[in-house]
Image: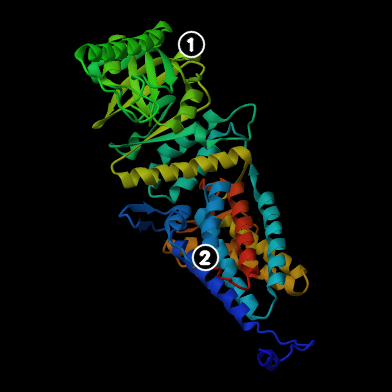
Amino acid sequence: MAAVTAAQPRASKTESYVDNKRKEDIRQANIIAARSVADAVRTSLGPKGMDKMISTANGEVIITNDGATILNKMEVLQPAAKMLVELSKSQDAAAGDGTTTVVVIAGAILKQCLSLLSHGIHPTVISDSLHKASTKAVDVLTAMAVPLELSDRESLIKSASTSLNSKVVSQYSTLLAPLAVDSVLSVVDPEKPDMVDLRDIKIVKRLGGTVDDTQLVKGLVFDKKASHAAGGPTRMENAKIAVIQFQISPPKTDIEQSIVVSDYTQMDRILKEERNYILGMIKKIKATGCNVLLIQKSILRDAVTDLSLHYLAKAKIMVIKDVERDDIEFITKTLNCLPIANIEHFRVEKLGHADLVEEVSLGDAKIVKVTGIKDMGRTTTVLVRGSNQLVIDEAERSLHDALCVVRCLVSKRFLIAGGGAPEIELSRQLGAWSKVLHGMEGYCVRSFAEALEVIPYTLAENAGLNPIAIVTELRNRHAQGEINAGINVRKGQITNILEENVVQPLLVSTSAITLATECVRMILKIDDIVNVR
C-alpha cells in the first residue's frame, strides 16, 4: 500500500496549467444545442410563419404555431436546450404573447456569443455587457412607447388582432379580437384596475359550427345537458340556483360491509326509509324556493339516484349533475352564491338568482345556459366553436394569447409598434451607444445590437421577401428618423407600421428582451455538466 502512495507524484505548489479545452467544449455544446431549439421554432415567427404539426406518443395530433406550445411538447434532452423551453414558458407567464420571439432572440444572441468567445473574450465580460445592453434596451423601448387609455377600445382591439394575425385562426381576428377585449374589460375590478385574473374568463369548447359561431356569454355555460330522467324541467325562468356539494342519495356505511336482509318486510322497510330520507331532503330544498340544482360530482357514492331524480322532477326542480369540483369556485363567484355542503345548511340567502336557465341545442349536443344573473360577479364565459377538435384547441390557444395581450395592456398601459420596428430601432441605438463604450464592452454591446436584427430578418424571410434588402432598407429608414417604420408583410414592403394598426404591448417586447438576455447569461456561465447518478 505504501509503495502505491509513493508512486504518485506530489502536486507542486506552482502548478499553473489547467485544461480549459473541456470547458470550452461544453460551453460550445450547450450553445449549439440551445440554438438548434431556437432554429426549430424560427420558421413559425410572424403572420406568415409556418405551423407545426406535433404528433405525441399517444397518437394525439396538435397543429399550432404558438412557440410555448411547440417547445412544451418537444422532448428536449440536453439540459441547456431545456432552458430555452423554460424561457418560452416564463415569457408565456409574464406576457402571454411573444413566446416564439423570445426564443429566436435568445438563439441569435447565443450565435453572437459563439463568435465573441472564439475571439477569446471571457464569458463573464460578455455576460455583464449583455446585462448592461438589455437594461439600456428596455429604456429605449420605453422611450418609443405610446401611452394608452383603457377607454380607447380601438387600440386594444388593434393589439389583440396583431397577436391573432400570426395564428392559424387569423382570418377570424375581426371576431376574436373584440371578444377578447370585451371579456377582459368586463372582469377588470375597478378597485384593483391593474390586476386581471384570467381564471375569471372561462373558455368552454364545443364541437360543431365554425369559429364564426364563437360567442361571449354574460353568464354561465355548462357543456353538459340538464338531467332528463323522469321528465324533469329543462327551462326555468326566475331561477333560484343552489350549488350543492352533498349527495341526494341514500347513505352508505362508512366501512366495507354488507347488510343481509332475510325477509320481505325488512326489505320494504329499507326501501321505505330510503324514500322518506330522500323526500325529507327534497322537501327542505323545495321549502327555500330553490328550483335549479347544480350538483357537484361525487367520488364516494352516486350524487343522485334514479329515485331522487324522480322526486326532484315531481318537485319541478331542474337538475344539472356532475359539476366538476374545479368549477365550483368560478360558478359561485359568477352566481354570487355560496356552495352548500350539507342539507342542514340549506338556506335562502345561500342561493343565486337568475332570469333564465335553459337547455340549448348546439349541433348534435346540448348545453345549459344561465343568463340574466342578479348581482353577477366579475366573470365571463366564452363559448368557442369549431369544425374539428384541432381547430377548437388552436382557437382556444390563440384566444388565450389575445387575452394575455389585453391583460398586459391593462397592467402596463403602453403600446409599441410591431413588424420588426422596435428591434431595428434598438439595434441602431445600441450600435451608436457601443461606440461610446470602452474596451471589450463596446464589442459585446455591438454584437447584442446585431443579434436583435434577427427578428426583422426572420419576418422578411418567412414572408418570402428578400431579407437582406428589406433589413438594409429598414436600417436606412430608421437612420433617417422614421422610428415606426416596419415590415408590412402583406404588401411586402416597408411602411409606417403604426398606420397599418400593427401594434403590441410594451410589456411583450421588454420582457422578451430581458428574459432572453437572462437565459443567455445563464448558459454562458455554465462551464461544466456533472452527471449525478
Spatial separation of the CA atoms under disc 2 and disc 1 = 57 Å
Compared with 430, 380 (above or below) is: above
Question: Upstream in the sequence, badge 2 or badge 1?
Answer: 2
Q: Residue at x 38, y 56 (%)?
A: 51
Who is closer to the viewer here, 259 or 341?
259
Residue under pointer 2 = 81
Residue 340: % across, % down: 47, 19
Who is closer to the viewer here, 453 or 320?
320
Q: Where residue 347 is drawn, which disc sits there?
A: 1
Residue 224: % across, % down: 32, 29
Q: Where residue 236 is drawn, which disc sits there?
A: none
Q: Is residue 80 something that shows in the picture?
A: yes
Q: Is residue 432 left or right of residue 511?
A: right
Tell me the amino acid under the disc marked 1. Arg
Tell me the amino acid under the disc marked 2. Ala
The crowd level at tag 1 (other Cα within 10 Å; few <14, some 14-19, many 20+) is: some
Q: Residue at x 42, y 16 (%)?
A: 241
Q: Is residue 316 left or right of residue 423?
A: left
Residue 68: % across, % down: 48, 53
